[in-house]
Amino acid sequence: MIPEYSLAYLTVLGLSPPRMVAAAAKAGYSYVGLRLHAVTTDEPRYPLHLNRSMLLETKHELAATGVRVLDVELIRLTPWFDVHEHDALLDVSAELGARHLIAQGADANLDRVIDHFGQLCDAAAKRKLTADIEFVTWTETADLARAAAIVGAAARDNGGLLIDTLHFSRSHDDIAELAKLPRHWFHYAQVCDAPSEPPKTLDGLIFAARNERMFPGAGGLDLPGILGALPAGIPYSLEIPTAALAKKVGLEECARLALESAKDFFAAAGGRPLTSASASRNRLHH
């Protein structure tokens, strides 16, 4: 089965949603992932739920190209989380035809974050969206076990667990544990490669995750193992920021190269994740 691919926002950080859709269409992606709520204080902001003219421009571009919206980010489940503060974002996500919302458990109190995640799932379900917890090594929800505990305890039919191959690897999680989790939790995955050895400092981890990821096959992560533990046929969101390369060739070309490398990487196994041995051979040719 040949996977469908989505262009994640971080891969083309700085492109407005309409330009991002156009770049995705030109490169050959099926989907885009839109960041409607900024993650950092210094990144460009494109809150389509507050900018009707850009929303209409984005919808026009989607209709003209046939590209669809896979996911919308990012909702943080903080201690002071109020689900109704996100009503406009959820409404616009549904209007765009998005399938999934990315959430992060930014709260050390597990019971409270479970309750808040349940509230988000309920609000998302009214808009025919899933809510998917992503764990990130430098946040309060830093590993597979805590993310799975949140999804399991919330027990919502539309609750999901988003695996990012970089964060999974950097959290030193066990692929065998990933494979044991309910299959219906996994709606798609974020894919990139990276050096097998992580940066030594927290600042290094954050910088590398936001600026120095690698195309599939160019690094040392166990992509075959991680993706092989997930359901077959789910879309792959290519989240591969390459800041140095982007300065040389431009963001649109980075989007094209990311998709080309992913297709090459999976083509050897007919679109299915490679075995570890064949993945090693494939990396020799990149």
Image: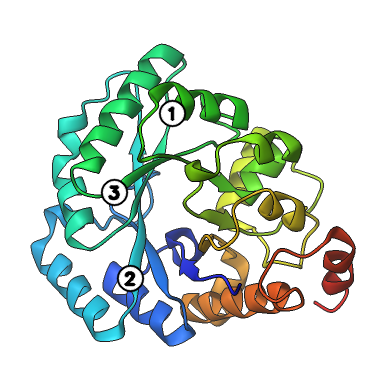
Going from the N terminus, do you reach mark 3 or mark 1 first? 1
Q: Earlier in the sequence, mark 2 or mark 1?
A: 2
- Horizontal and vertical percent position of residue 68: 33, 70
Give the SS element for disc 3.
loop
The label shown at residue 68 is 2
Q: Is residue 8 left or right of residue 233?
A: left
Q: CA distance from mark 2 to mark 1?
A: 27 Å
Q: Is residue 83 visible?
A: yes
Mark 3 or 1: in front is 3
Q: Amino acid at mark 1?
A: Gly
User: Label 3 belongs to which residue?
Assistant: 129
Q: Which residue is mark 1?
A: 105
* Residue 109 visible in this rendered orientation of the protein: no
How far from the left and from the top, in percent, is residue 113? Answer: 38, 21
Residue at point 45%, 15% (across, down): 110
Residue that protrudes farthest toward the left in the picture: 52
Q: Are marks 3 and 2 in contact (CB under 8 Å)?
A: no
For marks 3 and 2, the one nearer the N-term is 2
Report the disc number at residue 125: none
